Amino acid sequence: MEALVWTSNHKLELCEWEEPTIAAPDEVKIRIEMTGVCGTDLAVITGKEEGVPGVIRGHEAVGTVIETGSSVDRVKVGDRVVIDPNQSCEKCYFCLKKQPHLCTGTDGNGMPIAGLNRNGTFTFFYSTVQTFAHLLPDHMSWETGVLIEPLACVLHNFKEANVTADDKVLILGSGPMGLLSQIVSKSKAALTVATEINPYRLAFAREISDYALTPSQLHEATVDEICSGHKFDVIIDTVGTQLEMAEQWIERGGRIVPFGINANYRYTFSPTKFVQQAIKIIAAGEYRYMFEEAIRFAAETPELEKLVTRKVKLNQHEAAINELIGYELNSLKVVESDTVKTVFVP
């Protein structure tokens, strides 16, 4: 089968790969129907994050069960499922403390995660333990289902930040995670404001948030008017490089949530200011027992599927990646980006 593999050349390449098989009685084999390109994939491709060579990338996926092991009782052949890529071991120190998002694995080398340190979903078939294959509601589209894994991340961050109906929330960035955050914020908070530099994505944000602005429009007079003389109670940085801006616009007693991924980014702050103003930085980590809640939320929010704006084949990955990052990897030539969520449809 074909698969998109992160190679030792530090490139995402289309390779021929052996089709996975069921290796244990509690495993299922899934035919991938749709798999999303995540910001972490783009971070690896652009050198902002390390990638494990020789691994099929991809971890946001939905598919159809085509084979089951002898002890499988949660799903059956023909079922439509969404894949949980984080295979927590349920045995390590953190799993036993009900913190599976911090799992270190049975060997202490880290939690097996599809597309990161074990083969993922940028391909045609995928096998996993049945615990990590969740049934999709019959009426749910593949487009909505493929957003459940990133939605679980968003819901976990909102829960850890304790976002309430009294909060004014600023979401920096309107990529897929930013727009999902805006949709969740609209369901939980008093006010939702978003920023974005890309006109195409800014238009999406304006359909969701109470206010959607370019970063240059976010100045004192605007914030003062929007927030009735105050600043924001919660600020979520979905870009991964915006903590200086978050500090500028956070209210006393507020919560700043770093959410985007960029391992090269560094941020210097004054602990004294944060102590005196009771400002919290909340890093939530991977989602924690959030998949079922994400499925329920998605089932009640079918408009999520509108965020899937581009469907491409695996062999079209180069053009798709260039559009998502806004430039050609080889030449650095600027590429116009008119997509929110791009998915591969094998």
Image: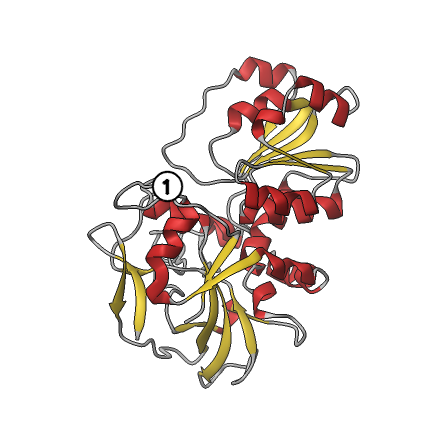
Amino acid carrying mark 1 in the image = Val
Q: Residue furthest left?
A: 9
Task: Write the residue at 42% across / 81% down.
Answer: 25
All told, the count of numbered labels is 1
Against 104, residue 36 (above or below) is below
Residue toward you, 13 or 160: 13
Colour convention: secondary structure
Which residue is the site of mark 1? Answer: 334
The quadrant holding residue 169 is top right
Q: Is residue 332 visible?
A: yes
Task: Write the residue at 39% across / 48% down.
Answer: 42
Q: Which quarter of the rendered picture does the N terminus lie within?
A: bottom left
The quadrant holding residue 57 is bottom left
Left or right of 44, for residue 285:
right
Within-10-Å neighbours for mark 1: few <14, some 14–19, many 20+:
few
- Residue 104 picture location, percent across and down: 41, 51
Task: Write the residue at 25% across / 46% down.
Answer: 330
- Residue 2 picture location, percent across and down: 30, 71
Left or right of 239, for residue 274:
right
Q: Which quarter of the rendered picture does the C terminus lie within?
A: bottom left
